Amino acid sequence: MAANSSLNPALDEARSAGDDARSQFESTLNDLARRAERAVNEGLEAMKSRASAYSETAGEGIDTAQRYVTTQVQERPMTTTLAALGIGVVVGFLLSGGRR
């Protein structure tokens, strides 16, 4: 029985050390999770701001193209109509894949 009583304090000490290690591990893991979440959120915010800038630039480009096409149609209606017809014929041939 003397051997058993000398093991109990050692087991208690090992359990206590294990509990301390587990607690420290959980604390470190939670800290890392918070840091990762912060980094992801900052990255998403940066992407949103860049996407917004690109969206505005694309919108301006579309507006410019629309004004150009409108101007060309008003100034040269016959030329624009023939160009659209030619593009339609070419696209039709490409989509048909050589089938007749």
Image (cartoon, rainbow, N blue to C red):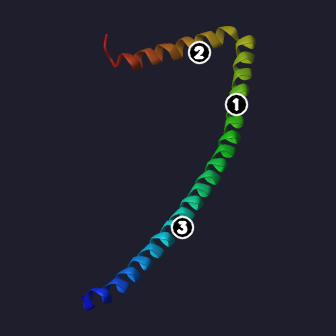
Lower position in the chain sequence, tag 1 or tag 3:
3
The foreground one among 63 and 53 is 53
For image coordinates 72% across by 35% down, the residue present is 56
- Tell me where residue 67 sits by quadrant: top right
List the residue tagged with mark 3: 27
| Mark 2 Cα shell of 10 Å, populated few (<14), some (14-19), many (≥20) | few
Q: Is residue 68 above or below residue 24?
A: above
The foreground one among 59 and 17 is 17
For image coordinates 43% across by 79% down, the residue present is 17
Lower position in the chain sequence, tag 3 or tag 2:
3
Query: How many badges with numbers are in the image?
Result: 3
- Tell me where residue 33 sits by quadrant: bottom right
Query: Mark 2 or mark 1: which is in front?
Result: 1
Percent across and percent down for residue 11 are 35, 81
Q: Amino acid at mark 3?
A: Ser
| Mark 3 Cα shell of 10 Å, populated few (<14), some (14-19), many (≥20) | few
Quarter of the image with the C terminus is top left
Left or right of 53, for residue 81 = left
Disc 1 on helix, strand or loop?
helix
Asked whether disc 2 touches disc 1, contact meaning CB atoms under 8 Å apart, the reply is no
Q: Amino acid at mark 2?
A: Ala
List the residue tagged with mark 1: 59
List the residue tagged with mark 2: 83
Q: Is residue 83 above or below residue 1?
A: above
Disc 2 on helix, strand or loop?
helix
Query: Mark 3 or mark 2: which is in front?
Result: 3
For image coordinates 48% across by 75% down, the residue present is 20
The foreground one among 42 and 92 is 42
Left or right of 80, for residue 99 = left
CA distance for labels 3 and 2:
69 Å
Q: Amino acid at mark 1?
A: Gly
Percent across and percent down for residue 25 are 48, 70
